[in-house]
Amino acid sequence: MKNNGFTLIELLAVIVIIGIVATITTPIITSAIATSREKACERQEEMVLDAAKRWGTDHVNDIDDGVTIKQLIADGYLNNKSLKNPKTNTEIDKESKVIILYDDNNHQYTYTYNLCVNAKE
């Protein structure tokens, strides 16, 4: 008589191997996801800063202390569709500002926008 099934020992061995592989790969995958979200968030910040720099170049006389995301969208410097926080997958607050300051010593403007710093995962 021929048995075509697996023994209990063989099934347990396969389950143990799957468990070990899952235990090893889960932290690696989680870390890779977190790293990719962080990089996406940094790219989003760079996109907003680039838009603010273009806006600042065109509106030098209108710079007070910065420009809001809402203004950048209204003036066509940012695309509204691409404005989500990659870490939280939520819409970016349109009232948040890119801070623009003029440095008298260097005669240059500095642009600051922090999307990723305050984002909770």
Image: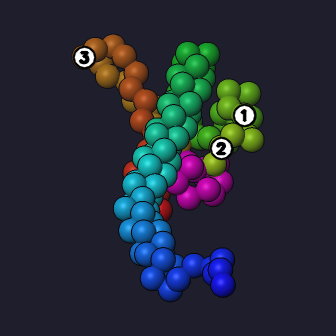
The range drawn in magenta is: 85-96
Q: Tell us which disc is closer to us: 3 or 2.
A: 2
SS under mark 2:
loop
- Compared across the picture, whether 114 is left or right of 85 comes to left
Badge 3 or badge 2: first in the primary sequence:
2
Residue 63 point in image, percent of width and height:
53, 27
- The quarter of the picture where residue 28 lies is bottom left
Mark 2 nearby-residue class (10 Å; few <14, some 14–19, many ≥20): many
Q: Secondary structure at mark 1?
A: loop
**Looking at the image, is mark 1 or mark 3 earlier in the sequence?**
1
Q: Which residue is mark 2?
A: 83
Asked if the residue at tag 2 contacts the one at tag 1, i.e. Cβ–Cβ closer than 8 Å, the answer is: yes
- Residue type, mark 2 in image: Leu
Pair 1/3: label in front: 1
Tell me the residue that label 3 is attached to.
105
**Residue that badge 1 annotates:** 79
94 lies left or right of 60 = right
Q: Nearer the viewer, residue 37 or 7?
A: 7
